[in-house]
Amino acid sequence: MPELPEVEVIARGLDASLRGRTLERVEPLSMTRLSEAENLLTTRVTSAGVRKVYRRAKVLLIQLDNGVTMAFHLKMTGRVVHGSSRQPDSHDRVFFHLDDGSLLSFSDMRKFGYVRTFATDELEEWDFLKRCGPEPLETPPEDLAQRIAHRKGRIKALLLDQSVVVGVGNIYADESLFRAGIHPEARAHTLSKQQRVTLFTELQAVLRQAISENGSSIRDYVNASGDAGAFQNSFHVYGKKGAACTRCSTILQARKVAGRTSTFCPNCQVK
DNA sequence: CCAAGCACCTGACGGC
DNA sequence: TGCCGTCAGGTGCTTG
């Protein structure tokens, strides 16, 4: 599901459409695995105004004007969509009814996602956020490169490790490694400083481009208005095993790295 | 510190 | 048509 660009696109869309609106009523649907705080959801967010909607790591945050912040993690298939009122379907987890008659829905086919509530001034104490590394778009590539300079793990695994840098998942890890000409199985400490800086510079570029193209839609992702993204049309390697490399025409290969399918060009990407 | 494996859960797709 | 295996934008826990 969504990586940084997709969550960022959703957050921007919701901030534009929800800011200043009031959540009048919460309608819990299939609450399976929503969170240990689910029983608090109804009381904590009813009749609360939306102050702002933003993103940290891959978490969507809705800050309310009553001292409460809601945190959504969409995991693989979660969706948060603001639209007109409708009947719930089997994947809907919770509905928020707004003062203008519109509907904010959280649905998740695979049920890995969750929504939790926090006292806004205690949000930073959340273990998940405390374990998170820096934001890739707000940190100089040189600083990110330094963080992995002495790590011996595979570079792909480190890109996916949210304590190294947040927001990167399987798509943008593979795409940034291709752009930087680095093999996913390369050990971080064997890369030159120049290679590491290039990698994070390319990561920033690919994330920015993906945001500008409304994210990547493979199966489930839609933005806050329910629309698909377009960046999947710009992939060089993700999901393209067996296709010709766009740069050298070598057939792209795939293998498991860090437990995830990793697609790369065996000619352009070196260890 | 690192790797690998499994777990969570549902649906889509391909092969026989 | 049906059954079975495999795979999927993520993360957490356990074991070695």
Image: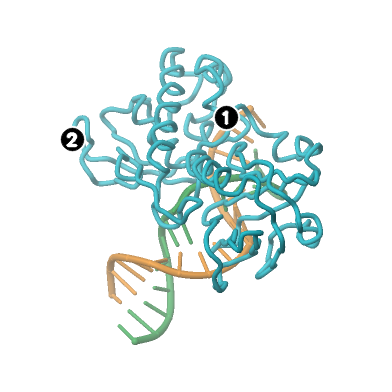
Chain colours: A cyan, B orange, C green
Which residue in the protein does label 2 denote?
A249
**Residue A21 left/right relative to A207:** right
Which residue in the protein does label 1 denote?
A165
Pick whichever of labels 2 and 1 is earlier in the sequence. 1
Please tell me how many numbered marks the rendered image carries.
Answer: 2
Residue A38's place in the image compared with A63, above or below, is: below
Residue A271's place in the image compared with B10, above or below, is: above
Q: Residue at x 20, y 40 (%)?
A: A244
Task: Please tell me which residue lies in front, A25 or C14.
Answer: A25
> What amino acid is at disc 1?
Val
Q: Residue furthest front?
A: A100
> What amino acid is at disc 2?
Ser
Which dot marks residue A147?
none
Residue A131 place in picture, x, y as percent: 70, 34
Residue A200 place in picture, x, y as percent: 46, 23
**Residue A21 left/right relative to A9:** right
